[in-house]
Amino acid sequence: DSRFGGKPKTKRSKRFLESRAPKLTEDVKSAMIMKGGNTSQTITQALKDIYSLKKPNAVLYKKKNITRPFEDSTSLEFFSKKTDCSLFLFGSHNKKRPNNFIFGRLFDFHVLDMIELGIEKYVSLSEIKASKFPEGTKPMLVFAGEAFDTDNEHRRLKSLLTDFFRGPTVPAVRLAGLEHILHFTAIDGKIYMRSYRCLLKKSGCRTPRIELEEIGPSFDFVLRRTHLASDDLYKLAHKQPKALKPKKKKNISHDAFGTKFGRVHMQKQDLSKLQTRKMKGLRKRRGEVVTEEQEGQAPKVAKVES
């Protein structure tokens, strides 16, 4: 099929292949959201809520997909090629692993890493009666908990969730656009996900007072199975093209606070010819000479009689 490679036969297929070809600045990452052969009402509703957070950069599959990603990921890779999605969320439910989520991402249409999370507690979007944010709002992501910095699996989970929810890369954001916050907390072996709407209140000064209102959905996750890429493959997936790497500027450095320092190279100066400011107190009075013996010592003045 010309959609997945080969020489295009029509202009339409040529445009399609060009849109799928590698670019210096890649398109926004889209996600496939699908459910397995066995699901529960909790999983079905939870997948719809995640789709609401991810829209419009997501595809929601309504039909069941009889597959097990940890055993065989070929169907996921096929759907990834078909929809050009590099992220996926798979929901399933069985006796051994009830209310199960699998977050994952692909590199070059092959599964890079997968992390399985079990839902222990869930509150849907519709259960929390509060005004929601507009579709496509870029969220602010907050990760709290020491495990996200120390444990390797939690570090990969943080990277995966950031990839999943970050949204498009934008050059600037207006203050009123910062209205959605996704908060992830790792504590006591569990991960708590909360969604808040940021309210800007009057404070009597230029900076507004911030209030957070929970809008849902709300999840209490427990970490289950993981399939993590090797360090070499993970490094390859994060490799940037040379054209995107910032050029190193000579004699410019930054400190820990981001302050910019520049170094200027100058020729050696002859300080004996340096023109300094003349002070009134250093001027010689009329009729006074400094003796040769007193040069370089405290200023003693010899009077000359006329």
Image (tube, grey):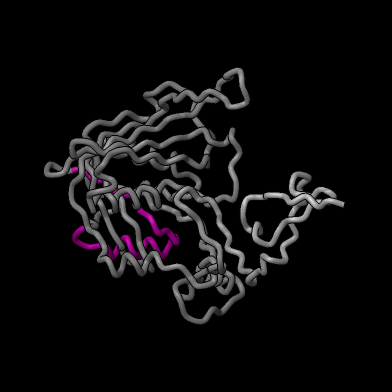
- Residue plotted at (49% across, 29% down): 198
Front-lying residue, 218 or 38: 218
Query: Image check: 118 left or right of 55?
Result: left
- Residue plotted at (24% across, 59% down): 228
Instruction: Tell me if residue 287 comes above or below residue 26 in the rendering.
Output: above
The picture quadrant where one finds residue 142 is: top left
Query: Image check: 281 left or right of 114?
Result: right
Image coordinates of residue 107 in percent, x first then y, are: 37, 65
Image coordinates of residue 292 in percent, x first then y, are: 69, 62
Query: Image check: 136 left or right of 267?
Result: left
- Residue plotted at (51% across, 71% down): 21
Q: Is residue 254 visible?
A: yes
Image coordinates of residue 86 in percent, x first then y, are: 40, 59
Residue 65 is inside the magenta segment: no
Image coordinates of residue 249 in percent, x first then y, are: 56, 67
Q: Residue furthest front?
A: 305
Residue span colored magenta: 70-93
Query: Image check: 143 left or right of 268?
Result: left
Residue 72 is inside the magenta segment: yes
